Image: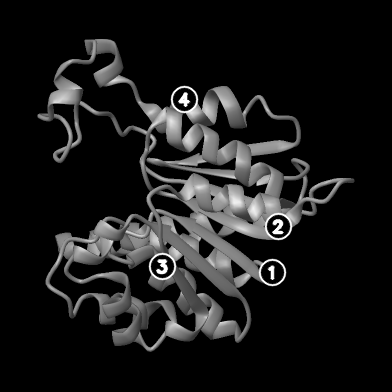
Amino acid sequence: MQVDEVDRALGEFDYTPLTSPAIGRLLYELALSTNEELLELGTGHGTSTAYIAAALDEKGTGHLTTIDRPEALERDPNVHQVLSHLGLQQWVTPIEASSYNRVLMRMLEEATDEAATEPCLDFCFIDGAHTWETDGFAFLLVDRLLRPGSFIVLDDLEWSFADSPSLRNTESVRTMTQDERDEHQVHKVVDLLIRTTPGYQVRLLGNTAFAFKGPPDAPELQGLAKAATTLLHELAIRHRAAAN
């Protein structure tokens, strides 16, 4: 399924996507060049799920597991409605769980024997809790499961409790210190955990981090740079056209 078709089909729903079309297109490009097993932590409406699944459909191979809390199914649309509308159900296994880190624990158990852990993932998109406690631990677990030559993508680098419409006025957030409320949680995961883990190369694009598990001269990083440049050029053309 071509990425333009995803844009059009998602536009037929009346909702505000949590993943921008620009990031969706980058996820699509990465999924096109990724091997078999992909993982998404934080399904939401299923917008990013659709872009990734469309890439798998386009190349005719691969599988995406996407995990979120059961409450995500209360969204309108939810991931099942989105995938059904786009005809992409066969490429995705949605999982509802109280914690995606518990699912990662089970995956780690299955991939580990007495000798070592056998990596089983080729890509991971982390766009769920956005907190240091949850997503910092999620990175440590995913790193054990991620094959060399693969990407971890983290969205919402600048997210904070103070800026969260759904959390900022809750009692638990009001009792936090101002420093804790204002902390950019995902950025801390990138700076303090991923950048300091040997073998990772980090590239930032706006509010999104792309962490590659491999050497700095890997062709995958060159492909990311090309895809990002092409997309930014395309967006600039659209912006100029809209202004005229």
Nearest the eye: 57 or 119: 119
Q: Secondary structure at mark 2?
A: helix
What residue does disc 4 label?
Answer: 188
Q: Earlier in the sequence, mark 2 or mark 4?
A: 2
Residue 140: horizontal and vertical position, in percent? Answer: 61, 36
In this rendering, the count of numbered labels is 4
Above or below residue 26? Residue 182 is above
Left or right position of 43 against 147:
left
Q: Earlier in the sequence, mark 4 or mark 3?
A: 3
What residue does disc 1 label?
Answer: 35
Q: Earlier in the sequence, mark 2 or mark 1?
A: 1
Q: Is residue 221 visible?
A: no
Nearest the eye: 16 or 45: 45
Disc 3 from disc 2: Cα separation: 24 Å
What residue does disc 3 label?
Answer: 49
Q: Earlier in the sequence, mark 3 or mark 2?
A: 3
Label 1 crowd bin: few (<14), some (14–19), many (20+), radius 10 Å: some
| Residues at circles 2 and 1 in contact by the CB criterion of under 8 Å | no
Residue appearing at x 50%, y 45% in the figure: 101
Residue appearing at x 86%, y 46% in the figure: 114
